[in-house]
Image (cartoon, rainbow, N blue to C red):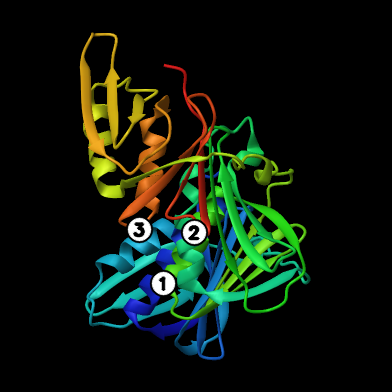
Amino acid sequence: MHVLLSRQDMLQAVQRCQNIVERRHTIPILSNILLHADDNTLHFSATDLEVGIQTSSSATVKKSGSVTVSARKLFEVIKELDTEADVELEVADGFVALKSGRSRFRLATLAAEEFPEMQHDEEGINIELDGADLAAMIAATSFAMSSDETRKYLTGTLFEVDKQGHLCLAATDGHRLALTRVRLQQNARAGQCIVPRKAVSEIRKLSEEVAGQVTLRMGDRQVSLLAGDHHLSSKLIDARFPNYGDVIPKSNPHAAVVERLALDQVLRRTMIVANEFTHDVRLQINGGEMQVSAHNTEQEKANESIAIEYSGPDIEIGFNARYIRDVLGALKSDVVTISLKDGLSPVLIKQDMDSAEYYVIMPMRI
């Protein structure tokens, strides 16, 4: 293999692959990137056996061929090279020689034949949508994924096409639920899958980087994303996601409207004296005011009030303040609506009553 290509193009491709590669892996070949040169294109592939990516860059191919090289070392080398000089790669005697400007490197390789073949579902639900919309949907929900590996089905995000023609994304850790939906512009059969955390993160990154439409394919065993020259695929979490429709409160008649940033600032200050693990705060809602308070075992206290629009009965309720702040950070509106029933029932937080984003938080006993 002997190729010449732009340093910037190669850096972007290698960086994208390096996000997939595990730094410490018991299988040495999985720490490498597969490079394959043909037809004036250099193809890059990386996988951890769960998530895989394939991308490519235009190149002058003097000799076609394939090889694998350490993802970490290749990235560190390319990153430090002269930004104006092209990169030349040539494979010989079990090494890849890299030249750029006055820089010369020789990196060890492993045989391309040892690199695992990436599998793709031939059939599935194909969805085309704007990459920015998909990235925004993931940003609005992914923070609610669980980190508890004992409940694997909660460590990913549900991707669902419902019978009404919406793409729905939902995530929950058992204490909160984040849900958003967008109407699709094409017909697609209903179906759902649970996408693992790492793949969710990479789908978001790719969707943000690529201008225009992306194609999401939801198969029986895999989910994949086609975004520009990138093809990301991932195994699914083989489990059943909780019925999120049962979690969304149907009868929370009392609505408090509050300025989003102002509430976030009050919570941030109050949390200073809250329990550092549970972040518990008490909200006391009456009339046109919300009192936010917290205390800890050292008898330290914090209390602050904020103006709200509210005409319901007095309600006192406790929450993990971090959960509320995560929701406030995901929303972009000036105000949010907090719908309540009483001091013991879940609350529903939305941008407004017509919003496609739903956030449900379970209360705490304080």
Packing grade of label 3 (10 A; few <14, some 14-19, many >=20) is few
Camera-side mark, 3 or 1 = 3
Residue type at tag 2: Ser
Q: Is residue 365 left or right of residue 177?
A: left
Residue type at tag 3: Lys
Residue type at tag 1: Glu
Identify the mark at residue 209; answer none if there is no mark. 1
Packing grade of label 1 (10 A; few <14, some 14-19, many >=20) is few
Residue depicted at 53% across the width and 59% down the height: 356
Q: Which label's residue is closer to the chain start, 3 or 1?
A: 1
| Residue 157 sits above or below residue 91 on the image | above
**In contact (CB < 8 Å): disc 1 and disc 2:** no
Q: Which label's residue is closer to the chain start, 3 or 2?
A: 3
Q: Say which residue label 2 marks.
A: 355
Residues 139 and 320: in front is 320
Alpha-carbon distance for marks 3 and 1?
A: 21 Å
Element carrying mark 2: loop
Element carrying mark 3: loop
